[in-house]
Image (cartoon, rainbow, N blue to C red):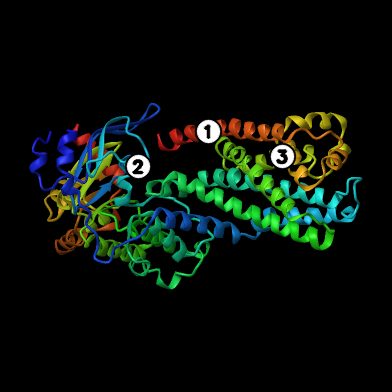
Amino acid sequence: MKENLSTDTHFPVVSLQGVSKYYGSHQALNDVHLDVHPGEVLAFLGPNGAGKTTAIQIMLGLRQASQGSVKLFGETPGPRVRNRIGVMLQDSGLPENLTVAELIRLFASYYPYSLPVEEVLERADLVAKRKAMVRQLSGGQRQRLYFALAIIGDPDLIFLDEPTVAMDVSARRIFWQQLQEFAALGKTVLFSTHYLDEADEMADRIVVMHQGAVLKDGSPQDIKRLVAAKTVKLKTDLSLASAQGFKGVERAEKQNGHLLVYTNEPETFLQSLMLENYTMTDLTVIDTDLEAAFVSLTRTQA
Amino acid sequence: MASKLITNQPSFKRQLSPTAKRSSTPLSLLAAQIYSEFMQNFRVPEFLIGVAVIPTILFMMFGLPNAGESLPGGTTIGSLMMASFAAYGIVSLCIFTFGVDIAQERGRGWLRLMRASPLPAWVYFAGKLVMAILFALVIMALLFLVAVLFGGVRLAGLEWLQLSLSLLLGGLSFSSMGFALAYWTKPRAASAIGNLVFLPLAFVSGFFFPLNQLPDFLQRLAPYLPTYHYGQLVWASAGKADDVALYVGQPIGASWVSMAWLLGSFLVFGVLAWWGYKRDQVEQFG
């Protein structure tokens, strides 16, 4: 393990060493090691049930690890370090009968330092809703309010558990822009998602989780090489072997008479197909199903 | 390992944004929590009416018709019934704000988000407590006003004070019963169970009708209920002892006995609540 901690200027703000978690006989996390450095934007990528939420809850001290050690800013997660972290959890629910501004002000009072309420309303795009009751907000607005509550304490470290899960595409784009502006203040950001696109666009580093274990920890480029973002599915006279040689194709396979091509650049692949006059019928381009991709990854690694 | 971490503290300096300000003192934090607890409930008409107004309505229905009747010692029926319905209102407030409220919040993720924030647990509970006291004052003010204006109830200044204090302090002893309920019932069942516990208690303790109008076995059961002793304290503050005994149909015990009962039940339910709270913490955050 790391011996030169005291000379390391990138002392990890989050450190998990050999963390496992059992719920009864079910193992939710399996020997997770992770160091997150100041200013990093890190994505936990994985399908449902991969252990992302459990990992985040353990880092927040909302759950206790069954084994291993967890440190935030060098301390055991608890009341003292909570002054410096902001949190967005899944399905939190909100007090329905407070106004947006009242709730943000309430949360501001929880923290020793806080950003001006005005600034947070702007950052979360809620200026027009400041006097609205929480019960009147739409799903997307609620999500923005959670974001506002997560940043009001000017945290050094912010955790977001599937922050965009209830958002449509345009809301998602705006949200990531807001988060990027906040991260630009030098904040460390940890978020979970099951969209490779999101992880790729936002994060400097992606930790791929599967069945409670870290499957891969690397840059977005590394991960995309491993798990191509898009799957092109079609019937064609192109052979499997030659498909694998096409530009931008990471992997290809045959399935029930269809050719499945995993690529990060479906446009390039399809253009080459057209130029070379291969037949194409029954064509679909879909986001790669992470669950399936990870299962096949674990199989190839084993 | 530990010493290494301490020498590295400087690398964990806070990186505040240029616009960040020092925001909270413990007092402003408590004030903000109380304000939001109060407003959350105040803005719910069902809560406001159900908890704050119903005692007064019940008093108008059952108390006003014979409020003017006097007992031999000069105590009016009106002042005793006013005290009864105030006691009813405050016990229901405790069961509902501490019990049902917290049980339902427990069922939502909101509590988890608050727990991940730096809010200390005691501020959360203190917020609930002060909110309950504020609503208890609203219940009493409304009821006293109607009793004075329409029921001809007259008490000396000191008697009003003694009545208010025994209502408040005695009432707060039921907070632990509320907490116990909150941590031992399922969120969805809390409201039904709250009523199931509270209504019989109020009935058998003589809050709706004087005890001597109830069936014999209930009269014999009553002295074993904390709410009955709450009633004793409250009635004794609102009228002369002989009159109260006549009204209740049973001799009035020494006030220290009633206080001991309230303290005892506060502690017993307090232990239950603590146990349930700990159990819940392990379940939710273990």
Mark 3 lies on residue: B230
Residue drawn at (71%, 39%) of the image: B230
Question: Is label 3 in contact with label 1 (beta carbons under 8 Å)?
Answer: no
> Height in image: B139 above or below A48?
below
- Three-letter amino acid code of the residue under disc 3: Tyr
Q: Is residue A56 left or right of residue B280?
A: left
Residue lying farthest bottom? A128
Can you give x and y, in whole percent of width and height, for residue A278 in the image? 19, 58
Question: Is label 2 in contact with label 3 (beta carbons under 8 Å)?
Answer: no
Q: Are marks 2 and 1 on the same chain?
A: no
Mark 1 lies on residue: B276
Q: Are marks 3 and 1 on the same chain?
A: yes
Res B98 → quadrant: top right
- Ranked by sequence position, the earlier of labels 3 and 1 is 3
- Three-letter amino acid code of the residue under disc 2: Gln
- Three-letter amino acid code of the residue under disc 1: Gly
The N terminus of chain B: image quadrant: top left
Chain for disc number 1: B
Mark 2 lies on residue: A57
Chain for disc number 2: A
Q: Is residue A230 visible?
A: no
Question: Is label 2 in contact with label 1 (beta carbons under 8 Å)?
Answer: no
